[in-house]
Amino acid sequence: MNRRTFVTAAGVSVATLAGCSSDSGGGGEETVELDDNEAGETDVSQRLRIPVEESVAGQTLDTVSASYPRDRFVVDSASHDAISLGIDQGDTGTTDEEFEADVISGVNNNDYSFTVTVDTGYELSTGDVVVLNYPAVTNPDEPGEYEVTVGLNDTIETTVTVQIDG
């Protein structure tokens, strides 16, 4: 396992999500934050923040996924080294554990979703938030609110709303 421990300020999101402020720190809610929320933008980095629930606490982190509306977003492939993965312990808004690209064992995508499979050896705890940046999503051409389903370890699946501006 290749990981390093560090503390850094989490990036500020530019998308306002349903029930979430544009601040990426804390709050215990699943979010999908966009580096650019303008309609039609390509190769947008999407930051998933998924709180660990009791149903997966004690499990080893092994998958993170997102599924977008089929006819709106386009998900392209991404290399392992372009994806970043970390853990915000205690949902403080800072990433406490960051994993190197070599822990990513697979990146599967189709036109509307991606699943990142990892071998971290990291045991999830209630209060942790898994943070994953996926750099290859094209926003819809039409502004509006879109539902995105995020998943953790094939157990937790939650739908969040992403705002795309015109």
Image (cartoon, rainbow, N blue to C red):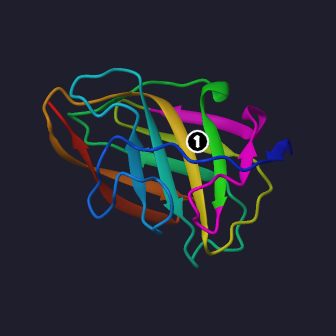
Please give left or right for residue 97 compared with residue 70 in the image.
Answer: right
The part of the chain drawn in magenta is 89-109
Is 116 included in the stretch rendered in magenta?
Answer: no
Residue 21 coordinates in the image, percent (x, y): 34, 58
Q: Nearer the viewer, residue 31 or 76?
A: 31
* Residue farthest toward the front in the current orientation of the protein: 9
Please give left or right for residue 165 compared with residue 107 in the image.
Answer: left
Please give left or right for residue 101 compared with residue 74 in the image.
Answer: right
Q: Nearer the viewer, residue 151 or 44?
A: 44
Residue 5 coordinates in the image, percent (x, y): 80, 49
Is 99 included in the stretch rendered in magenta?
Answer: yes
* Residue farthest toward the right in the current orientation of the protein: 1
Q: Quadrant of residue 96?
A: bottom right
Q: Nearer the viewer, residue 121 or 144?
A: 144
Q: Nearer the viewer, residue 4 or 103?
A: 4
Residue sitting at 66 percent across and 48 percent down? 86
Q: Quadrant of residue 112?
A: top left
Q: Is residue 32 above or below residue 35?
A: below
Residue sitting at 72 percent across and 50 percent down? 7
Residue sitting at 24 percent across and 29 percent down? 38
Q: Is residue 139 above or below residue 1?
A: above
Residue under numbered circle 1: 116
Q: Amino acid at mark 1?
A: Val
Residue sitting at 69 percent across and 45 percent down? 118
Q: Residues within 10 Å of mark 1 (few under 14, many from 20)?
A: many
